[in-house]
Structures are given as C-alpha cells and as structure tokens.
C-alpha cells in the first residue's frame, strides 16, 4: 500500500490542478484503509523526496490527533511508532520534514505523558541534550522545544528538571541552535510558572539567566536576525505573565533593546521587535521605566531615528500604517509613553527634542517634530492644554506654511489631533485657526491631485475642529457650506468623499442651523446612494450613508423626520444584497440614528433589521487561523477532507489537535467594525424603540452576552455598553406598561456581577472603563431596583474603592503614588468617581456616610498643592456632588472640607475654581449651623472672585451666582440683600453652567413671592432673562415650570411692568412671555 500512497502524494506535487484534485480524492479513499498509518510511516522513513516525507508526517499527525484514535491502535503499533519516530527525527536532514516529525512527537507526548506511557522519551531527550555530540544536543533541544509547544501542560510535573536542562543549554557555545531552542522552550513554558505556588521558585532559573539569554540573542543577531526575533519573544511572554522575573533586569534589557534599535545596519524586523518590547514595558510596568530613569535614554535613541530620511510610497497615515519599519513604529512608542507615563515625567523630556527638530532646516526633522506632537496629545491632553497650548498651536500654524509638502501634511495631522483631544480649550482659537484652514482648503481643492495627502489632512483637521465648535461655528457656516456644496458638484471623487464627511462634521456643530442648506445637501447626496461599479463610487456611497446618519442625529426632527422612513427603506433594500461589511456597518449606524426620531414607530422594520444585525454579530467572516508552525497549514490539499466520517460531530474526545496548533485568530478590521457597529446599534435601537423591541430582546441579549468573551478590545467594550442599554430598555418598558420584571431581574443578576468581575480582572483599561460607565448608567437610569435586585451595594462600592487604590488588574499596583499617574490612568479613577454621587443618592446619606469617610481619604490625596489640575478638578467636583447627594449628614466633614474648598476657590485654574465654588455652595447648604457664622467670609470670597473674573470665565460666574443663592436659601438672615440681589441679577442669564438655572430661579421666585423688595426692584431684568432662556435647551422641564410660574407671578403682581418689558423685547421673546401666561403648570397650553 505504501507504494500506492507515495504515488498519490507525488501527484500532489504536480503543477496541475486537475491532477491535484484527482490525487486528493484518491487520498481520501486511501485514508479509509486501516493500513494507511503503516504506509505513511513507511513512506516517512524511506521516501527520497523531502516534500513527500513532509506530507506523510503531516498526515500521520492528523491520523493520531485525537486521544481515542491513538489509544485505539494496537499496543505494538504504538510502541513501534514511539521507537521509530525518534530515530527518524535523528536521521532526517531536511528542516521542514524535521519540524513535521516534531509535531508527531508532540502529539504522541500529549497523549502519553499524563499516564507515563512513554518513559523512553525523556530518557532519549536527556541522553541527547547531555551528549558530547553537538548534533545530538541540537536534536534533543529541538524535541524539548516541540514538547513545550505541543504538550506544555503535560510537562508541568517535569518543569524543574526541564528548566535545569534549559539553563545549561543556553550556555552551549558550540552551537547556536541549542541555546536558541532552549530560549524558545522557556518562552513556551513561562505561563506554567505562575500557575501553582509550588513552581514559583522556578522563576529564579529564568531570572538568574537573563544576562546569558541576552548574550545568546546578541550572538544570534549576527547570524540569523529572524531567530533572534523569535528568542526575544521570551521577554514578551515574561511581561504578560511573569513580569516580576524581568524587574531586576529591566534597565539591562531596555539598554539592550535600545542598542538594537539604534543600529541602522540591522533589519527592520529586529529593530521594531526591540522597540515593541519598550512599548509593552511602558504599558505594563511603567514604574520600572520611571524608577530606572529610562525616559531620556529611550527618547535620545528613538527621536533621531524618527528624523531619518525614510522615503515612503505616498506616505500613509501614521495611525493607519502597519509598522514595518522603525520610523513607522516610533510614533506608536511615543503614543504608548504619552498614555502610560505621567505627563510631567515625559513631556518636558520630549519637548526640547521637538523644538530642536522644528527649528531644523532638514524637512524630515520638522516632519518628525509635528508627528511627535500629534501622537502624544491624546495621552497628555490636560497637561498640554494647561502648559503648552498657545505654544504648540503657534508651532502648528507655522507648519501649515512650511515649504515642504510632507511637513505641511504632518502639521495638519497634528492640528487634527489637537482639535480632537484638546477640547474645549482649543475652540477659543477658532478665529485664528479656521481662516488658516479655509485658506489651505481652498489651495488644496484647486489642484487635488498635486498633494492628495494634504487634501485628506486638511479635511481631517477641519472636520474634528468644526464638529466640536457647537454654536461657535455659526459665523463661519455660510462660507464653509458654500465651499462644501460646490465640491459636491466637481468631478474629483476623493474631494467629494471628503466634503460629504465634512458636511456631517459641520452638522454635528450647527445642528438645526443646517436647515437653509438641508434640501440642497439631500439632493446632492441622493445620486451617491446607489452604488457604482468602481471602488471609488462605493466609498462615496458609504460616506453618504454615514453622513445621512449624522444629519438624522443632529438636524432635529422637524428637518429630518419626513425623510426617516425613506432612509429606512433604503437601508433595508441595501441589506438584501449587501456582502460588504463596511456597507452593512454604515446601514446599521443609519438605523440607530433614525431610531432617535421614529422611536416606537420603527417597530415594523425591526424583524429584518435585528436579524441582519444578529447575523453580523455571530458571523465568523474575515477570521484567519494562525498556526504555530507553517507545516501545519499545508495548502495543497484540505486536511479536513481526510477526517473519518464517523468523527464528524464528535465532541466527546479530548482536545482536538487544532486547539494545540492554533496560535491565534485574526479578524479583518472591516468585519470587526461591522460586528462592533451591529452590537452598538442594537443597544441604541433598544433604548429608543422600547416596547416593540421586547420580542427581539432575548436572542439579542444572548448573542451580545457571548461577545463579552470576544478577544478584540473594542468588541468587548461595546458589548458591555449594549447590555446596560438592554437593561435600561426593559426597565422603562416595565415602568410604562407594568410588564413583569422577571426578565429584568435575571438580566441584572447576570450583568452586574459580570461587570464587577471585568472591573476586577480585565487587563485592558478601556474595557474596565466601559464596565464602570455602563454600571453607572444602570444605576442612574434604573436606580434603587438595580441595588435591591442584586444586593450589590457593597460589591459595587468595593470595586470603586479598588480602582481608587489601584488594586484592579488593569492598574499597575505601584500606581498609588499620584505623582506617577498618567492621564490615561486618571480617566479610570474619574469614571469610578462618577459612580459615587449616584450611589450616595441611591443608598441615602446616613447609610453612605461610612463609605464617604473611606473615599474621602482617596479624594483628599488628589487635592494637595502639588496635585495636577485635572486631579484637583476631579476630586473637588466629586466631593461636591457627593455632599449634594448625601445631604445634611455631610455636616460631619465641614471641619475638613471648608478650609480646603476656601483655598481652592482661588486656584489659578478656572475649572478648579468653578468646581470649588460649586463645592463651597453645597457645603454651605448642607453643612448645618456650624457654617452659618462663616457666611460673611464666604460671601466676601465669592465677591472677590467676581471682581477678578471680569466676565472672562462665565462658568465660574455662573457657579458664584448659584453658590450665593444656596447661601440665601440656607440662612437668609446672614445675607446683605441690597448688595447680593443686584449682583445675582447681573449674572443672568447664565452663560455656561445651565444646570444651575434651577437653583438660581428657584431661589429668586421664592424671594419674589415673599415680597423681597430688592428682588421686586429687579423685576424688569428678571423678566427679560426668563424670556431669553425659556423653551431652550438651557433649562430642564422642572426648571421650565419654575420659569413659567415666575412669569405668571410677575404678570399678576405687576401687569403694567410685564407689558412694558415685553414691548422692549424682540417679537420672539415677547411671544414666549405671552405663551407663559397660557401654559398650564409650565408644560403646555
């Protein structure tokens, strides 16, 4: 039979598809013959063709992959294979065949080692690795590496002896392969070291030999950089699972990596590998970087490399490229450093290098400076806003006029990043930046092909700047829309795509003010909704659908609602034949946007819509399996075709071979985005549609729950958020319709413990933040029932405490020193801080008091004189909100908090001042008699702030106004009304902090009703301010009621004055006052 099988395998080598297909069929038939295994073993040992030997080895391994297959063989057959396979490995000259034979040995070992049925294996390995013959030592180490790769778990009982062998092997100076396989074996076994306490001492074997491992890699680099790269993976494994092993050698390993990175004669792969270790170390163990003062050495090596004159084909975006070269990878290292290092330990070190580069005559240096500024801004946004905003904007504006295209493009990229991450402060510079962008946009649009990257970058910068401007965009809206609509009529496809996207960004800021342009926009967009034949036309279609969704979200129901059902039908039609994941993603987002308008009227469309989204969530399209060895992915024939028919559907066997051979799964980004948007859209639709969504809830909930285990970070984040939206949807339906709460109880009892487990154990901060934020949403929208159903009060507060004290898995346990904290670290703590006032409100002041005492210590640590602005702002704001939620029991903390708040109301930062003023107001309100004697001092301090502010910081003034009102409502006898009331009225209407409208107008109407003469004297001003804010988004419904009642009281008491003031107002405002008189309880006519 061996001869026949060898002939079949030989046919598989023929360059003829028909011959290969015929041979595959013959092989499948041959596989049914009981003698196939013996034939393959014979071929492996006798064929003169190395490819045929390799195929036979792969097929042998496939035949014995399952334990029951192996165990079903006669003992003499198994013994023969055990004995001969080792000898065949020794004799085999071809590397690929040797690797394939190794996988057979690993497979057998996985079956035999647990019951010690192959004692000869370890005897053989021991003899080989201790042999005087270099070749035998190499064979022994190769087998050991194969065992660690294929049967690592089974090696656990032998770990100490194996590690002793490895320690000796890395010292072998007669062979490069012996130490190479030793290090690769360590990499495979590192994960076992932390699994049991009894194995902890094994760490020392690795730890003590790190210097020797570095020497081995250094020698390997000289002869085989690829193998050196593979050995460096040991450090990645140690970082991920046993970072303590590396800690004593961090400086040595980093220095080694920097030496590699700095050598331009080395290949890109090894240099990028070295840099990636530095990035991973920064992400996982940033304190080691700080402790050993490695920031400067890293920057001094990497920044000059970034300045290298590296030519790139139509240079891709920094954020989009695959980082194949050092110049491409360094921005990612800087980004990681900015996210994970404290800004004051990173930015001052990098800025001198950037300044020198920007002053250079070499355009590559200037480009490096702008790229560096662009990538660090996300992680250090607060620091840059507070210390460098004006300077960096000046630099970027200068870069926009640079004579070199690449430098200008990098400056535009930096401006786009600033616009995205330096909010809201950067919008203050709109009058300087927008004219520059318009000028550059005009130039780039005249000849878009001359600098396509420049065109893309200017639109990017314009978009992110405009979408955050809100009403400040209105002065620039006419010229901007004139340009964008003109571009839609041109012939250049890329320009059209960018303009359509920019229209969406503009609508995000302008909202209802887009009405004059809306009809023309829609007329232009209609022609792009039907897909074209070219890739460019497909891109136009996708961008058009995206922009439609943005218009639906922002233009308001009056403008977009008439188009809603037409857009829904368009989306449904597109989905019927859609295979492109990007198209499906865009349609799902459009559906979610329209659900904000149609609400329950969307019910008729849900069946097909939900079905499509669930298909996307469950889809495995775009997934690629990656194997540990290429020999396991031979593509000439499909190994799955050779599985015995009786195995199909069998699930009771031990581990399938594939589970051991698959190293990972990658998914194309487009399919990940489709899955993410499908999940996100389901949550939004559920919230908006309500009761009609309930019949579809169970399958949606089940599938999204599965996504919590998905390996991609973004998918986990969005699934966490969607589950909370499902809960809120069910809760609202229960309230509105009286529906049974069993489903809600089951969901909450499942989801809240899951969130708490994710917070405790997940290593990705953004995932943990999503869990904290989603938990906060459930607590805010569902309230006490969420705590009563789950009994989770203590677990939730314990989880928040763990975050505050850096005790969750995604935090470095050495982070508790706030001076070592990156802004990225602080974001998680701020999310946890947002939960505290909500919990205080739900639990009640008296019951929350012990928790308040516990968290007070953590918050006070962030209010030191040396604390950063964001820390102080967060801590004082959180304390104020907790005091407000706790109420009168907060008096217990007056002695501690009063002097602190009084100091902070004079802080140099306006956000800290604003929050501190709010805090002193609520402390005065709930601090009890103890503070009444201090009211004159508080009032004087508040008036001092007003005299300093000079209307420059409207939020601070709004908070001063509200704080004074709280003092009045708490102890009016201590208030000099003749000075206070005119001051309050002069602040009206409030300019930014509209939340405080309720406090201010509630106070004033009470005084008005009580006949306070100073308030009565200000009636005209009060009436005017009421007219300017009523029926706007500046007031909530409960405040609207107060304003209507106030207007009615004024009309009742002073009808002539009412008419006199109304006559001085514009018609629209005067009409609002008339409407107030017709409203019932402030809610309508």
Image: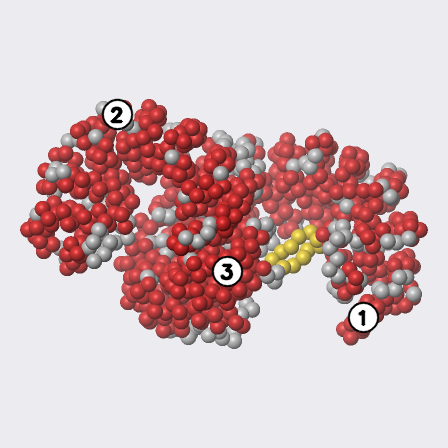
Spatial separation of the CA atoms under disc 1 and disc 2: 93 Å
Pick the front one: 876 or 870: 876
Percent position of residue 1011, x then y: 11, 39
First along the sequence among labels 2 and 3 = 3
Tag 3–tag 1 contact (CB < 8 Å) = no
Q: Name the residue under label 1.
A: 25
Q: Mark 3 points at which residue?
A: 696
Residue 657 visible in this rendered orientation of the protein: yes
- Residue 333's place in the image compared with 966, above or below, is below
The residue shown at (27%, 58%) is: 475
Colouring = secondary structure
Spatial separation of the CA atoms under disc 2 and disc 3: 56 Å
The numbered disc on residue 929 is 2
Q: Which of marks 1 and 2 is in front?
A: 2
The residue shown at (78%, 72%) is: 21
The residue shown at (34%, 29%) is: 889
Residue 91 visible in this rendered orientation of the protein: no
Q: Which quadrant is the C terminus positioned in?
A: bottom left
* Left or right, 778 with reference to 966: right
Spatial separation of the CA atoms under disc 3 and disc 1: 46 Å
**Tag 2: Cα neighbours inside 10 Å, few (<14), some, or many (≥20)?**
few
User: Residue 249 sits in which quadrant?
Assistant: top right
- Residue 232's place in the image compared with 577, above or below, is above
Tag 1–tag 2 contact (CB < 8 Å) = no
Pick the front one: 286 or 315: 286
First along the sequence among labels 3 and 1 = 1
First along the sequence among labels 1 and 2 = 1
* Left or right, 248 with reference to 1076: right
Q: Secondary structure under badge 2?
A: helix
**Tag 1: Cα neighbours inside 10 Å, few (<14), some, or many (≥20)?**
some
* Left or right, 1080 with reference to 284: left
């Amino acid at each position: 039979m061996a001869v026949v099988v060898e002939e079949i395998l030989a046919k598989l080598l023929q360059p003829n598809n028909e011959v290969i297909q015929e041979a595959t069929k013959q092989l499948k038939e041959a596989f049914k013959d009981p003698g196939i295994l013996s034939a393959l073993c014979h071929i492996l040992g006798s064929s003169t063709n190395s490819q045929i030997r390799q195929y036979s080895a792969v097929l042998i391994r496939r035949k014995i992959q399952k334990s029951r297959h192996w165990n079903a063989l006669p003992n003499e057959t198994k013994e023969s294979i055990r004995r001969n396979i080792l000898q065949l490995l020794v004799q085999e000259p071809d590397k690929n065949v040797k690797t394939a034979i190794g996988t057979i040995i690993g497979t057998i070992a996985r079956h035999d080692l647990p019951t010690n049925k192959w004692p000869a294996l370890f005897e053989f390995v021991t003899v080989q690795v201790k042999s005087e013959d270099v070749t035998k030592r190499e064979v022994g180490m190769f087998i050991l590496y194969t065992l660690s790769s294929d049967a690592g778990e089974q090696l656990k009982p032998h770990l100490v002896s194996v590690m002793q062998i490895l320690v000796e092997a890395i010292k072998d100076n007669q062979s490069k392969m012996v130490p190479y396989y030793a290090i690769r074996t360590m990499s495979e076994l590192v994960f076992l070291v932390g699994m049991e306490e009894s194995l902890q001492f094994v760490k020392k074997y690795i730890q003590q030999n790190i210097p020797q491992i570095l020497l081995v890699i250094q020698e390997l680099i000289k002869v085989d950089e690829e193998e050196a790269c593979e050995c460096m993976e040991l450090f990645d494994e140690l970082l991920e699972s046993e970072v303590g092993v590396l800690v004593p050698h961090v400086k040595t390993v980093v220095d080694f990596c920097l030496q590699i990175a700095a050598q331009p004669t080395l290949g890109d792969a090894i240099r990028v590998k070295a840099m990636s270790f530095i990035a991973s170390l920064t992400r996982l163990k940033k304190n080691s970087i700080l402790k050993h003062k490695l920031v400067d050495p890293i920057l001094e090596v990497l920044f000059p490399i970034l300045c290298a004159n590296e030519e790139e084909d139509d240079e891709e975006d920094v954020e989009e490229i695959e980082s194949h070269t050092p110049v491409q990878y360094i921005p990612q290292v800087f980004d990681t450093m900015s996210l994970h290092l404290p800004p004051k330990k990173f930015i001052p070190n990098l800025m001198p290098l950037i300044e020198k580069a920007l002053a250079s005559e070499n355009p590559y240096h200037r480009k490096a400076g702008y790229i560096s500024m662009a990538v660090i801004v996300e992680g250090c946004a607060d620091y840059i806003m507070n210390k460098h905003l004006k300077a960096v904007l000046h630099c970027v504006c200068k870069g926009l006029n640079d004579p070199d295209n690449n430098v200008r493009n990098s400056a535009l990229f930096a401006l786009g990043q600033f616009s995205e991450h330096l909010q809201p402060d950067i919008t203050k510079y709109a009058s300087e930046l927008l004219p520059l962008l318009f000028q550059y946009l005009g130039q780039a649009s005249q000849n878009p092909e001359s600098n396509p990257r420049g065109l893309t970058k200017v639109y990017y910068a314009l978009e992110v700047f405009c979408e955050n401007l809100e009403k400040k965009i209105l002065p620039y809206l006419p010229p901007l829309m004139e340009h964008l609509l003109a571009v839609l009529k041109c012939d250049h496809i890329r320009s059209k795509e960018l303009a359509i996207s920019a229209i969406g960004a503009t609508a995000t800021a302008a909202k209802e003010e887009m009405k004059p342009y809306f009809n023309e926009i829609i007329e232009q967009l209609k022609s792009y909704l039907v897909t074209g034949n070219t890739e460019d036309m497909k891109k136009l279609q996708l961008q058009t659908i995206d922009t439609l969704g943005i218009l639906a979200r922002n233009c308001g129901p009056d403008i977009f609602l008439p188009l809603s059902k037409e857009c829904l039908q368009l989306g449904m039609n597109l989905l019927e034949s859609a295979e492109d994941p990007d198209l499906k993603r865009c349609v799902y987002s459009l559906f979610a946007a329209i659900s904000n308008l149609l609400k329950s009227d969307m019910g008729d469309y849900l069946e097909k819509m939900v079905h499509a989204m669930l298909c996307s969530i469950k889809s495995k399209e775009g997934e690629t399996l990656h194997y540990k060895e290429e020999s396991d992915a031979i593509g000439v024939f499909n190994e799955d075709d050779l599985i015995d028919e009786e195995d199909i559907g069998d699930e009771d066997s031990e581990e399938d071979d594939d589970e051991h051979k698959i190293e990972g799964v990658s998914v194309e980004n487009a399919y990940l985005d489709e899955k993410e948007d499908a999940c996100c859209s389901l949550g939004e639709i559920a919230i908006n549609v309500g009761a009609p969504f309930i019949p579809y809830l169970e399958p949606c909930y089940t599938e999204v729950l599965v996504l919590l285990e998905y390996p991609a970070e973004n998918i986990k984040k969005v699934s966490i958020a969607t589950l909370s939206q499902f809960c809120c949807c069910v809760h609202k339906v229960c309230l509105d319709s009286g529906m049974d709460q069993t489903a809600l109880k089951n969901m909450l009892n499942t989801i809240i413990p899951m969130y708490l487990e994710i917070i405790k154990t997940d290593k990705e901060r953004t995932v943990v933040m999503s869990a904290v934020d989603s938990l906060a949403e459930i607590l805010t929208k569902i309230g006490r029932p969420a705590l009563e159903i789950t009994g989770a009060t203590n677990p939730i507060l314990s989880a928040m405490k763990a975050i505050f004290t850096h005790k969750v898995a995604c935090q470095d346990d050495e982070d508790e020193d706030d001076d070592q904290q990156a802004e990225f670290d602080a974001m998680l703590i701020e999310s946890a801080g947002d939960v505290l006032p909500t919990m205080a409100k739900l639990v009640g002041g008296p019951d929350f008091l012990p928790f308040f005492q516990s968290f007070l210590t953590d918050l006070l640590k962030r209010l030191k004189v040396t604390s950063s602005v964001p820390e102080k702002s967060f801590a004082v704001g959180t304390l104020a909100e907790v005091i407000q939620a706790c109420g009168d029991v907060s008096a217990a903390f007056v002695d501690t908090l009063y002097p602190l708040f009084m100091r902070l109301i004079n802080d140099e930062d306006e956000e800290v001042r604003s929050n501190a003023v709010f805090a002193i107001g609520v402390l005065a309100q709930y601090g009890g008699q103890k503070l009444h004697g201090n009211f004159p001092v508080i009032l004087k301090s508040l008036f001092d702030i007003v005299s300093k502010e000079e209307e420059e910081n409207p939020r601070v003034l709004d908070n001063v106004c509200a704080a004074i009102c709280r003092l009045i409502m708490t102890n009016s006898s201590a208030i000099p009304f003749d000075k206070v009331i005119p001051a309050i009225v002069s602040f009206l209407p409030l300019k930014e902090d509209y939340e405080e409208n309720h406090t201010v107008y509630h106070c004033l109407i009470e005084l008005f009703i009580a006949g306070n003469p100073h308030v009565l004297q200000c009636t005209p001003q009060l009436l005017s301010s009421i007219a300017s804010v009523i029926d706007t988004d500046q007031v909530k419904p409960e405040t609207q009621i107060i304003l209507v009642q106030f207007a009615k009281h004024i009309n009742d008491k002073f009808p002539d004055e009412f008419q006199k003031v109304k006559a001085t107002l514009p018609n629209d405002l005067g009409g609002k006052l008339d409407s107030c008189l017709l409203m019932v309880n402030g809610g309508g006519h």
